[in-house]
Structure formats: structure tokens, C-alpha cells
Image: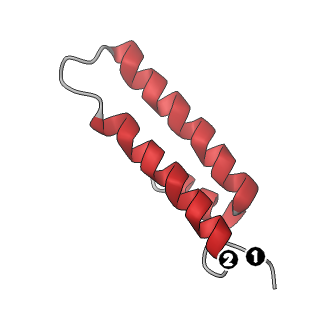
Amino acid sequence: MEKNYHNCKLIKEKVDAILEEMASLFTNLGIDSSPEEVEQAYKKERELIEKIAELDETKANNLRSSY
């Protein structure tokens, strides 16, 4: 069986930490954020999803399809 988010505690912990970082990207944005700051947040989000893909491709694909 292949290790993934659902059956490996270490992968789950790593992915959850990345997801927490992703969430903080957007909670730190506000109405006074410039378009460049918003674009940087989306760029960083895509980079973090790629990190998740290294751990669990299925989880990353689910995140990609959610937006």
C-alpha cells in the first residue's frame, strides 16, 4: 500500500503544516492589500501545493481542483 495523507501520520503532519501556512497567506491579506500582494499569496499557494504533491499527489490534485 502506498503511503499517503490518509494512512501515514508523518505525511499527514507535514501536509497539515503546509495547509496551515497556506491558510495564513490569505488571513494576512486585507482590503488594503495591493494586487501584487494578493498575486504573491496565490503564487506562494501554488508553490506550497507543489510541496504537498511531493508527499501526496492525490491530495495536491484535490486542492488544485478546488479553485
Q: Nearer the viewer, residue 45 or 24?
A: 24
Q: In the image, what residue type sits under mark 2?
A: Cys
Q: In this image, 2 relative to 5: left or right? A: right
Res. 13 image quadrant: bottom right
* Residue under the image location 39 percent in, 35 percent down: 25
Query: Quadrant of the image for the N terminus?
Result: bottom right
> From this viewpoint, is residue 67 visible?
no
Q: Position of residue 37 (x, y in %)?
A: 38, 18
For marks 1 and 2 on the same chain, the one whose residue lies earlier in the sequence: 1
Is the Cβ of the residue at disc 1 closer than 8 Å to that at disc 2? yes
> From this viewpoint, is residue 59 visible?
yes
Which residue matches tag 2? Answer: 8
Q: In this image, 59 relative to 39: left or right? A: right
Q: Position of residue 39 (x, y in %)?
A: 44, 23
* Residue under the image location 62 percent in, 57 percent down: 60
Residue 40 image label: none
Q: In the image, what residue type sits under mark 1?
A: Lys
* Residue under the image location 66 percent in, 66 percent down: 11
* Residue under the image location 38 percent in, 46 percent down: 23
Q: Residue placed farthest to the left in the image?
A: 31
Q: Position of residue 6 (x, y in %)?
A: 60, 78
Badge 1, how many Cα within 10 Å: few under 14, some, many 20+?
A: few
Mark 1, secondary structure of its residue: loop
